[in-house]
Image (cartoon, rainbow, N blue to C red):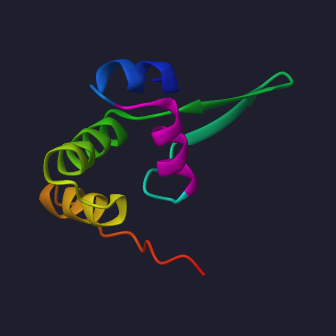
Amino acid sequence: MTPKDVIEKAPGLTRDQLSYFVKMGYVKPKKYTRGKNEYTEYSENDLLVIEKALYYIQTFDTKPKSAFEKAFVELRQPERNFNRK
């Protein structure tokens, strides 16, 4: 699904937040090129993680890093390393 689709399906999510989540490595959508254009494709799993993390951010005022860590644990996914160098 496109970034627009993700934003529409995740209540309260903004384009800036989605960009930040990708930039920080919390979500890793697939990128592909068609002609001269580059596209970003999010999976259903990406959407689930974003929705769960956004819930923690909005409900408990959790920092994004902690929210995504909790979301990955809750959804039983391999933990990602969010420590940036």
Toward the viewer: 9 or 58?
58
Image location of residue 45, percent across then percent down: 31, 41
Q: Residue at x 40, y 35 (%)?
A: 43
Tell me if residue 1 comes above or below residue 31 in the rendering. Answer: above
Tell me if residue 1 comes above or below residue 23 in the rendering. Answer: above
- Asked if the magenta segment contains residue 71, the reply would be no
Span colored in magenta: 13-23
Kindly tell me whether residue 2 is visible in this rendering: no
Toward the viewer: 78 or 57?
57
Name of the residue lying farthest toward the bottom: 85
Tell me if residue 17 comes above or below residue 34 in the rendering. Answer: below
Kindly tell me whether residue 41 is visible in this rendering: yes
Q: Residue at x 24, y 59 (%)?
A: 62
- Quarter the C terminus occupies: bottom right
- Asked if the magenta segment contains residue 14, the reply would be yes
- Quarter the N terminus occupies: top left
Q: Residue at x 26, y 59 (%)?
A: 67
